Image: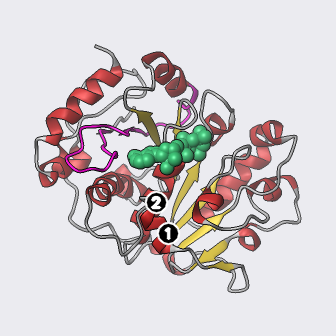
């Protein structure tokens, strides 16, 4: 049985369970190290508290977007109509599914002591091929985190050749990550865009740059991501990336983030693509699979998730 069949089978089983049971850790694990879909009990999810962990103590000292940085008004009504979550979303199936996904990521993000993960608050969202739902999942995950009272989230459009985050949110572009990487005079906080959701800000991809693959692989890229991790360590940073089989961006980012949410499109992503893509992002030790666009969901929503954990 291949990885995706196993994940789908697990989802079918779990869809018969209550959401509470599923949230309580009945979801299986995928080891990105061995790239097997052997299901393992997930002690972290089992121990999931009903509320999100407190942000790191560094919260008070972290740098926020400048008060002078651009502020935009997201059209929440339009987003809702297009199936996206907003902080005041009704408790739909989609909202509940993302809540479950979010809980496990947050536990890792702010784990302390032995369980602490370097840059655990940096989450890369990627998939093998185009159109599998990376941007959809990045935005919904960001919205779900933004609905937490004590947490702030920075959504980074790291898909430099097809930056869709701002378009989808109805925001016009501006300087962004590419500019920060390529121009030493551009400060990160100048590029952040604040929104009418007080704890959600956005970092655009920035201008098209024909040296992007080289820049991405450059030391500077690593420095910038580390800078984001240090300056904003109280917040959850979500990187929407290009497909890992189509661009080196995902594999480069995987070297710096603490966690990866890997989107698998039900009935589409092939086993070979999945294996190859997972090997490309093996720089990240904590890879979580999310099965998207399933038909197993009990509601009309196309979203359904098998959410797997893997520790190496
Ligand atoms: N679970 C879902 N339910 C409903 N629509 C979805 C879901 N996931 C993705 N979509 C839709 O599928 C289309 C492709 O999704 P999205 O743009 O997120 O893919 P992507 O992986 O980011 O693509 P690309 O690789 O081109 O950036 C979009 O129209 C999106 O709204
Ligand atoms: Mg996309």
- Residue 301 lies, with reference to residue 200, above or below; the image says above
The response on whether ligand 1 sits within 8 Å of label 1 is no
Between 36 and 196, the residue placed more toward the observer is: 196
User: Horizontal placement of 251 versus 267: left or right?
Assistant: right
The number of callouts visible is: 2
Between 198 and 135, the residue placed more toward the observer is: 135
Task: Say whether residue 164 is visible.
Answer: yes
x, y percent for residue 245: 61, 27
The response on whether ligand 1 sits within 8 Å of label 2 is yes
User: Which residue is tagged 2?
Assistant: 82
Q: Check residue 78 in the rendering and tell me which mark sits there, or answer none.
A: 1
- Residue 39 lies, with reference to residue 297, above or below; the image says above
- Residue range highlighted in magenta: 280-307
The part of the image, by quadrant, that contains residue 256 is top right
Mark 2–mark 1 CB contact (< 8 Å)? yes
Between 63 and 13, the residue placed more toward the observer is: 13
Which element carries disc 1, helix, strand or loop? helix
Q: CA distance from mark 2 to mark 1?
A: 6 Å
Residue at the image position 69 percent from the left and 33 percent from the top: 248
Residue at the image position 58 percent from the left and 34 percent from the top: 130
Q: Residues within 10 Å of mark 1 (few under 14, many from 20)?
A: few
Which element carries disc 2, helix, strand or loop? loop
The part of the image, by quadrant, that contains residue 228 is bottom right
Task: Say whether residue 254 is visible.
Answer: no
Q: Where does the C terminus fall, quadrant-wise?
A: top left
């Amino acid at each position: 049985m291949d990885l995706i069949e196993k994940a789908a089978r697990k989802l079918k089983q779990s869809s018969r369970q209550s959401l509470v049971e599923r949230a309580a850790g009945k979801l299986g694990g995928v080891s990105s190290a061995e790239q097997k879909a052997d299901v393992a009990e997930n002690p972290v999810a089992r121990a999931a508290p009903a509320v999100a962990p407190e942000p790191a103590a560094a919260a008070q000292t972290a740098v926020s977007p400048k008060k002078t940085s651009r502020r935009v008004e997201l059209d929440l009504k339009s987003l809702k109509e297009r199936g996206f979550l907003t902080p005041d979303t009704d408790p739909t199936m989609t909202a509940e599914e993302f809540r479950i996904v979010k809980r496990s990521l947050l536990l890792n993000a702010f784990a302390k002591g032995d369980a602490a993960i370097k840059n655990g608050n940096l989450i890369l969202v990627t998939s093998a091929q185009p159109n599998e739902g990376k941007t959809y999942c990045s935005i919904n995950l960001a919205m779900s985190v933004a609905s937490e009272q004590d947490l702030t989230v920075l959504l980074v459009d790291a898909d430099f050749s097809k930056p869709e985050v701002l378009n989808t949110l109805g925001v016009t572009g501006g300087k962004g990550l590419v500019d920060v990487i390529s121009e030493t005079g551009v400060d990160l906080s100048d590029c952040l865009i604040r929104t009418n959701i007080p704890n959600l800000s956005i970092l655009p991809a920035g201008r098209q740059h024909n040296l992007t693959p080289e820049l991405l692989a450059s030391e500077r890229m690593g420095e910038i991501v580390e800078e984001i991790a240090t300056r904003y360590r109280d917040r959850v940073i979500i990187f929407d990336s290009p497909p890992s089989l189509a661009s080196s961006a995902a594999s480069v980012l995987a070297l710096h983030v603490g966690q990866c949410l890997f989107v698998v499109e039900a009935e589409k992503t092939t086993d070979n693509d999945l294996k190859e893509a997972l090997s490309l992002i093996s720089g990240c030790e904590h890879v979580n699979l999310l099965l998207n666009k399933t038909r197993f969901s009990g509601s009309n929503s196309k979203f359904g998730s098998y959410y797997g954990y893997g520790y190496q």
